[in-house]
Amino acid sequence: MNTIEQIQKTVADLVPLYSQAEADLPDRPLWEHPEIDTVIESLRILSDILFPGKYMPEPSDFRRFFIQQLENVVEILQQEIAKALPIRWKGAADLHENRTPIDNLDRASTEIVNQFLATIPTIRTMLIEDVKAAYNGDPAALSYAEVKLAYPGLVAITSHRIAHELYLLNVPLIPRIMSEHTHSLTGIDIHPGATIGKGFFIDHGTGVVIGETSHIGNNVKLYQGVTLGAKSFPLDEHGRPIKHIQRHPTVEDNVIVYANSTILGGDTVIGKGTVVAGNVFLMQSTPPGSLVTRADGGVVVRTRETSERGAGI
Amino acid sequence: MNTIEQIQKTVADLVPLYSQAEADLPDRPLWEHPEIDTVIESLRILSDILFPGKYMPEPSDFRRFFIQQLENVVEILQQEIAKALPIRWKGAADLHENRTPIDNLDRASTEIVNQFLATIPTIRTMLIEDVKAAYNGDPAALSYAEVKLAYPGLVAITSHRIAHELYLLNVPLIPRIMSEHTHSLTGIDIHPGATIGKGFFIDHGTGVVIGETSHIGNNVKLYQGVTLGAKSFPLDEHGRPIKHIQRHPTVEDNVIVYANSTILGGDTVIGKGTVVAGNVFLMQSTPPGSLVTRADGGVVVRTRETSERGAGI
Amino acid sequence: MNTIEQIQKTVADLVPLYSQAEADLPDRPLWEHPEIDTVIESLRILSDILFPGKYMPEPSDFRRFFIQQLENVVEILQQEIAKALPIRWKGAADLHENRTPIDNLDRASTEIVNQFLATIPTIRTMLIEDVKAAYNGDPAALSYAEVKLAYPGLVAITSHRIAHELYLLNVPLIPRIMSEHTHSLTGIDIHPGATIGKGFFIDHGTGVVIGETSHIGNNVKLYQGVTLGAKSFPLDEHGRPIKHIQRHPTVEDNVIVYANSTILGGDTVIGKGTVVAGNVFLMQSTPPGSLVTRADGGVVVRTRETSERGAGI
């Protein structure tokens, strides 16, 4: 078989698989869904409104610049939210939730966009507190500009505070496309559902995972590799994971969690001011002001001559 | 010295270093190798064939669209594989493997491309199982579309199933350029050599490393930060690492490995249905149905008043 | 309120917040700072000079090609360094350091660029040692070209050796923008201040964090998820973190640190030839030739029938 014949055979084999998959996975075709690149574009414009100058030159007229940028965001979000809304009642997972279709998608989308616009000043106010928390929390930070221009934790919380407002407005999929893009850029994976208080700082950040139903208080600081995750998934009477209970921890005000620690469980409450050391695996609540360390008494240091080569590595 | 003079001096110092390096590192110049950006472009087109609509608008004619896309892939891969094949016998590491040069690179490349084309329908079938595994494995997933559009684990396994077929066809370098690009996007580092069964799901994924000779069964689920790695490298009579023995673990069907656990060793077999808890460091085999946890008895929780400031953090 | 009215209200609410923030965060506006995209462009051109052919086709005239590329780099760096220098004395954090303004920013920037140009041949020489270290340190590496084209550890150390020279020349912000871009690409976060010897190899790399005042010797090898971090931050008489003491570890020649281990503290010295196993949490020095393992005696393996469902996970 030459290459042209092989291409035709491959396509002949592929096409029925797409039909089969549509029967297996009852979604609409992907092109009816929000466009990834367009959603990411809206996130970038919003970041520029929240930190003007980070990516764009100085505008000649500030007020006009912001109005234009918001008009661009509105145009994108109205269109993409209208595409996303049917997922609420057409998505396979929602079939058991009996949600009723919306008649006028454009009007519904416009209402959501208007509500979202009203939240932007509050997002900005929160982000300034986050900049201060990063600056004060890291001796290596030499200016606020450094935090704004070179801290992945700020990129992550900026994206999250935007995506979280859309999540609260019950917009399907778009917040997750935003959070996943930011995850790709920063290595920080915050589900849009997570509730996060003021003055939040993630240092370095690669490997951080914050689950959908996490509750985080004010002035909390996390280091790279920290997971706030689920312990196990309670199932409903149909054997499906129950989707709307708290599966992830509560972390109260002024808590610090050092690198690569894992905290699991919807019942787990880390009390105010607790410090969790690095590489800790924690599935229990702690009283306020606790210090949590590993129980293993640390490490064994041997000279290599007295040990087998390769042992323990 | 002014800047122009300094530029000339720097270039005068640099040029002999390139010649020196060629003597030290007996590769051909980099421009004779596959182009990174072109290889990544082929990966993107293949992703669109496997999940049509993820990045591109709806085509007016499906069959024609797929044929055109495959023609584009064929053109890229024929050209880049022809550049890659000489690495088999010219690459420094292969000098001791006595491989003989191929006379007609274009013909050899075309044959490989044809064989690769024939695997695409099977890749698609496998990926649908992966989508289902992700949807069923994560309570936060609300539709199949969400998995297809916003799950890094699916990006990683899509790329891997493509790269692995090229690896099996003994194509040098190109599979690794693909896997490394995907590693950059997702934080998930799967060597193209790894064998992975049906219904594979990596949740969150940042920090996952799956080594070249890993064997993974069906319906396996890994969380972020999991390593399937090598324990030590047996050396040959010349003191060089032996390249073609199993250095990485075998993970049997229905195994779950929770966040940030490390499993090492080519002799290590994780038996069917085993659950490995988070933050575990494991270098031994487990019987089927095992539950593996840390032996350290968990954590110590103290009030901070009774402990030294900074201790344990 | 319709959308147009809502946009105007949002802008009316936002504009005073920007003025407020300027009072709170005494930086210059972001558009007076170095441009992120331009700095990244200079890093890309420098990478191409250091590994010609990685991203660009073969030039017809080598010497002329390098001169043109360096001229491009010089133009970018002169302009961006001139923007960055005022951060030394205008940045909030530097207010207590009493640095005096530079009169002629362009001349100061040119001098720095000239000094930087002179370091490029040495950077190239160091990087060839890094390529060899990667090739020799990884059985999966089949050619030097594979290391140059597909190893994130090499991307990270290339960027670091460039950023570190600018850091030594006391250039604000630009080295951090470079290191953060590379962090985003590779998951490897090396502060530009870190001192790193010859023949350095990071394998896989996602989640690696190397702090500003780390000292790393020759022929050191780190795996994914390794942190060289700070234990605690000594405060000055104003309660501010002291910025110029060693807060991060010293790692001597020929040390290997396996995956996901954390080493903390400015007093911590890992002696020559020490091997630190995976998932170790270490806050003490080790004598030369040590082998460091976890003290927890490994893991507990139970059959799942005898254990509670969900326990330990």
Image: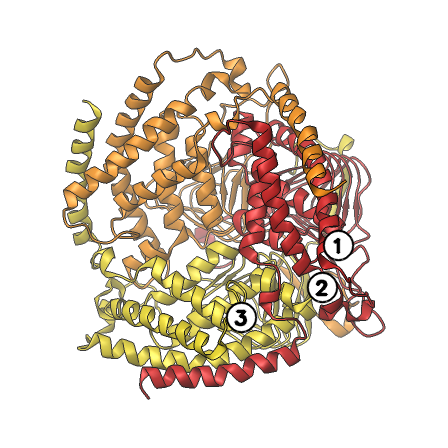
Chain colours: A orange, B red, C yellow
Please report, as a chain letter, where disc 2 is located.
B
Residues packed near mark 1 inside 10 Å, few (<14), some (14 to 19) or many (20 plus): some
Q: Quadrant of residue A237?
A: top right
Q: Is residue B22 above or below residue A106?
A: below
Chain under numbered label 1:
B
Q: Who is closer to the viewer here, A196 or C165?
A: C165
Q: Residues under labels 2 and 3: Cα distance?
A: 20 Å
- Left or right of residue A238, residue C239 in this image: left
Residue at the disc numbered 1: B108
**Picture quadrant where residue A113 is located:** top left
- Are marks 2 and 3 in one subunit? no
Please report contact status of discs 2 and 3: CB closer than 8 Å, yes or no.
no
Q: Estimate the x, y position of residue C294 in percent, counting from the top left.
A: 67, 58
Residue in view at x 82 percent, y 40 percent: B287
Question: Can you give x and y, in whole percent of width and height, for residue C119 in the image?
Answer: 44, 80
Establish whether labels 1 and 2 are both on one chain: yes
Question: Does residue B253 appear anywhere in the picture?
Answer: yes
**Does residue B126 show up?**
no
According to the picture, the residue beneath numbered tag 2 turns out to be B86
- Local secondary structure at mark 2: loop
Q: Amino acid at mark 2?
A: Pro
Q: Amino acid at mark 3?
A: Phe
* SS at mark 1 in the image: helix
Name the side, left or right, on which B174 lies relative to C74.
right
* Disc 3 target residue: C51
Q: Is residue C266 above or below residue B121?
A: below
- CA gap, disc 1 and disc 3: 29 Å
Asked whether the beta carbons under mark 1 and mark 2 sit within 8 Å of each other, the answer is no
Q: In the image, residue A62 lies at what x, y percent? A: 16, 46
